[in-house]
Image (tube, grey):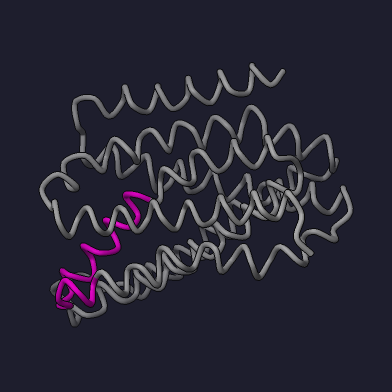
Amino acid sequence: MFTFTFGVVTLASLLACIVTTAGILAITRYEKWGKENAVYFISFAAGVLISVSFIHIIPKSIEMNASAPLFLLAGFMTLYLFNRFLNAYICHEYECVDLTLGVIPMLGVGMHSFLDGVIYSVTFNVSIFTGVLAAIGMVLHEFPEGIVTFLLLERSGFNKRKSACYAFLAAAISTPLGTLVSYPIIDKFERPNLGALLAFSAGALVYVGASHLLPAVERENKKYSLLSMFVGIFVAIIIVLSKG
């Protein structure tokens, strides 16, 4: 059944798909520009994701479910263990076939992007405002994700065309797929269950921001990356305060 919420969720996941695709196209056509500026998108997205999680999504989930902190921890640890599992199979360049360096991370990105689609379903079912807040940071981090996926595939031996195609399938189209698969189920959840899922999603968002995006920013150590992160935090706070 088509509803306004379903339309907004679908639009958000499609926007994420488009932004990821834009990242892939940017790196294929303007490789130097993409590498030089991806860190600013990453740092801004990290600021938004972490801020939104702590000042809005987590308090909202606790309001809906008193056991939310347990699900918050579960969400954080689930993504942590998932990434530890993936890293256990990623060889160092001098120890294994180069193909593994691109394919395994691509599968990990695909799983992560699918879960992004599920998070859209959860947050927008809580409220449009909560969904929009989560989507701001998530959509922005899709651009560098497309770039990184493409570069890993190209580095592992695929040509530009195949790298772009596989990056699109793994990082871009998997997000709306996750939304379409999860939405019909999540739409039927009661408020406490939805609160638990929201807390789980918040744990996942905090993990992505703190354990993936921020370390990537620190590795780059660009001059204005810290500024772009604080801009992301400021934007998140202004949006939340304006709602209150």
Question: Number of numbered discs present?
Answer: 0
**Residue at x 78%, y 66% (from the top left corner):** 185
**Residue at x 40%, y 22% (from the top left corner):** 231
Q: Which residues are magenta?
A: 143-163
Q: Is residue 147 above or below residue 63?
A: below
- The answer to which of 130 and 7 lies nearer the viewer is 7
**Residue at x 54%, y 57% (from the top left corner):** 116
What is the x, y in percent for residue 67? 82, 45
Quarter of the rendering containing residue 206: top right
- The answer to which of 99 and 21 lies nearer the viewer is 21
Quarter of the rendering containing residue 156: bottom left
Q: Quadrant of the N terminus?
A: bottom right
- Is residue 160 inside the magenta stretch? yes
What is the x, y in percent for residue 79? 54, 58
Q: Is residue 226 above or below residue 61?
A: above
What is the x, y in percent for residue 244? 72, 18
- Is residue 27 inside the magenta stretch? no
Give the side of residue 180 with respect to residue 138, left or right.
right
Give the side of residue 80 with respect to residue 184, left or right.
left
Residue at the limit of the structure toward the left, as seen here: 32
What is the x, y in percent for residue 145? 35, 54
From the image, give the main secondary structure of the stretch colored magenta.
Answer: helix
**Residue at x 43%, y 37% (from the top left corner):** 46
